[in-house]
Amino acid sequence: MADECFAHPRLAAVYDPLDPDRSDLDAYLLMAEEFGARRVLDIGCGTGVFALLLAGRGIEVVGVDPARASLDVARGKPGSERVRWICGDATALPPLRTDLATMTANVAQAIAGPTAWRGTLRGAREALRPGGHLVFETRDPARRAWEGWNREATHRVARLPGVGAVETWCEVTEVDGPLVTFRWTFVFAADGQVLTSDSTLRFRERREVEADLAEEGFEVEDVRDAPDRPGREFVFVARRR
């Protein structure tokens, strides 16, 4: 099930305007070039920002996401016809033979359940050619990023063309071991509608991720720093055995 911020049509439509800086994707574009990827599977593609950047470079892309509303936004963007969009997840993909599979931003952490997580890794492996790479990021639990997820630190009002003012803020609602649940609130000034979206992320230790990858048929080649969040995230580079 997709969170409301991705699955609700009104929230999906403002997702990109509320978060226009996607410089975090630069490192992934460089890795696609580094690995000579010509075919890429973008797991949790959302509104298609990364998939379309890849397609614009002549790369064959499959974008998969469970949120139909987000895919509708992606399909409405220029160049979307160059991407194969699939509504679903990595556990039930058609036969593919890709060079690279990616999970950008919070995608890996949003797959919080152990069964779904292992199924996603398995699905990514099956979609890759032998020797293909899986790349994703996850926050370092030791940095306790969720401690800054409160109204005081996250509140803002954005004025979006054609939409008007949208007030947003985030608050943590529960911390249960490695699971952190939080709620985003959206207030649309144009008509006063208030929408909320609850999300749960799993903060995995580096050794836990490395063990999961090894058990699902990957060799961890590198664990890199995230250029946009130095010292706060692990970027895993794993090769299909």
Image (spheres, helix red, strand yellow):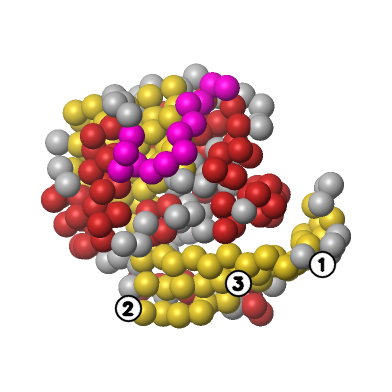
For marks 2 and 1, give the CA distance. Answer: 36 Å
> Residue 67, relative to residue 33: is it above or below?
below
- Residue 25: x and y in percent read 51, 43
- What is the crowding at mark 3: few (fewer than 14 residues within 10 Å), some, or many (at least 20)? many
Q: Nearer the viewer, residue 130 or 196?
A: 196
For marks 3 and 1, give the CA distance. Answer: 18 Å
Range covered by the magenta-colored residues: 81-93
Q: Are marks 2 and 3 in contact (CB under 8 Å)?
A: no
Is residue 119 part of the magenta span, yes or no? Answer: no
Mark sitting on residue 170 = 3
Residue 28 seen by the camera: no
> Residue 11, relative to residue 71: is it above or below?
below
- For discs 3 and 1, the disc positioned in front in the rendered view: 1
Type of amino acid at the residue the image marks with label 1: Gly
Q: Residue at x 51, y 72 (%)?
A: 182
Q: Are marks 3 and 1 in contact (CB under 8 Å)?
A: no
**Residue that mark 1 sits on:** 192
- For discs 2 and 1, the disc positioned in front in the rendered view: 1
**Residue that mark 2 sits on:** 177
Type of amino acid at the residue the image marks with label 2: Gly
- Residue 60: x and y in percent read 44, 22
For marks 2 and 3, give the CA distance. Answer: 20 Å
- Residue 8: x and y in percent read 62, 53
Q: Nearer the viewer, residue 218 or 233?
A: 218
Type of amino acid at the residue the image marks with label 3: Cys
